[in-house]
Amino acid sequence: MGCLRTIFAISVVFVHSWGHVFVGGRNAVQLFYIISGFLISYVLVESRKYPFLKDFYINRALRLYPVYSVVAFSTLVALFMQYIFIDMPSLFKVWDESPLSAKVLLLISNIFLFGQDWVMFSAIKDGHLIFSENFQNSEVLLAGGLLVPQAWTLGVELTFYLIAPFVVSSRKVMYLLLIASIALRLTLIKIGIGMNDPWNYRFFPTELALFLVGALSHQILCPLYKKVFVSKIDLVSNLSTYFLIIFSLFFFVLPIPGIYKNLFLFASFALLLPFTFVFNNKNKWDRYIGDLSYPIYIGHMLVIIIMTNIMSIFPIHDKKIFAFICVFFSILFAVFLNKCIEIPVEKIRNRFRSLRSAGIQPQ
């Protein structure tokens, strides 16, 4: 699971710096949703690490906000440097040209993450902030006002975290919501917007199905596989994980029509996800590589901004080379964030969980 998460994160880096590599950007985001549903179900239903509801929310916040805050602040500093030495960043222009209502939306979503996904359903028309089915049809592209633009996915994640404790503990509720989510997606496709951005993977009510698929994979397939395979679980987990890694790495070059390739990717991933979880728990190196996925994902646009500014002075005309440079430095930046931010925060999270499990109120 760890290697797969990092492959998906690097897929997003390539999309933003060059083009579709590995599983591509949208697939990577939606596969992350499935993983998130699986892990949150494990935490809430099986391990029961959080005896109180607020503990779950506090730990989720500690997981997301520290790294995000560092990257957002660093991005702001980098943009000010660009403003001083090169030219005015597009983000500053967005803020300058937006009405007060849009500035409030951007300010709140940049600070708290909540609402970043809804920026993708907002536009400016006649100087007013409006709901829009296409955020690009706007006098000002509001998405350009996000310090960490890819963090809109965290807005979707946070919405799932809010409802997860009330959903994943009941199979009946999950089935009902899964049917409703799929039905809504089909309805949107029928009326002609379901396959268009932002409705195709930024709209939480339809993306909820993916989180629920992950949760059901944990609750149904995990116990089934442990019962069926018993002594062979390690072998099957190794084979399944390596298969998904190879499939993900070469997905973009497979000569198969896109719709069938995508269906097989998501189906095989949901079915084999429990095995990758077993593999992750038994391999420290896989966990370490997986720990880099979130900082790679959150930090890569800052790397791209910095490298773009450098390339304006020392140009590289081959976008492929530029993309690989961005991937390389995104990984280096992720190692730094992991060592300096994530590992210390993880110690705090572990201590918090231990104290709360023992019934002790942290000081």
Image: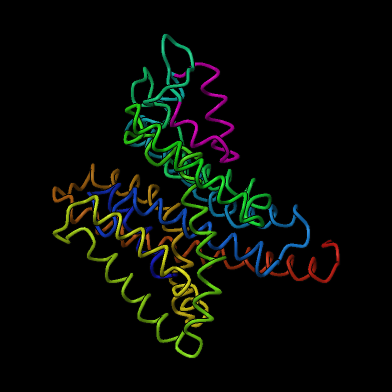
Question: What's the magenta bit mostly, secondary-structure-wise?
Answer: helix
Residue 22 falls in which quadrant of the image? bottom left
Residue 276 falls in which quadrant of the image? bottom left
Q: Is residue 11 magenta-colored? A: no
Q: In the displayed image of the protein, which residue is found farthest to the top?
A: 126
How far across and down, in percent of the image, does residue 114 sit? 58, 38
User: Which quadrant is home to the C terminus?
Assistant: bottom right
Q: Which residues are magenta?
A: 98-121
Q: In the displayed image of the protein, which residue is found farthest to the bottom?
A: 231
Q: Left or right: 340 with respect to 145?
A: right
Tell me: residue 46, above or below residue 134.
below
How far across and down, in percent of the image, does residue 349 sit? 68, 64
| Residue in front for this viewpoint, 325 or 80 | 325
Tell me: residue 141, above or below residue 165.
above
| Residue in front for this viewpoint, 143 or 157 | 157
Which residue is drawn at the image coordinates 46% and 44% (left, top)?
207
How far across and down, in percent of the image, does residue 87 sit? 33, 31
User: Which quadrant is home to the N terminus?
Assistant: bottom left
Which residue is drawn at the image coordinates 45% and 66% (left, top)?
335
Q: Left or right: 24 with respect to 172?
A: left
Q: Is residue 118 magenta-colored? A: yes
Which residue is drawn at the image coordinates 49% and 90% (left, top)?
231
Q: Left or right: 213 with respect to 138?
A: right
Count the marks.
0
| Residue in front for this viewpoint, 197 or 283 | 197
Which residue is drawn at the image coordinates 38% and 67% (left, top)?
4
Asked which colour scheme the image uses, the reply is: rainbow
How far across and down, in percent of the image, does residue 266 sit? 36, 58
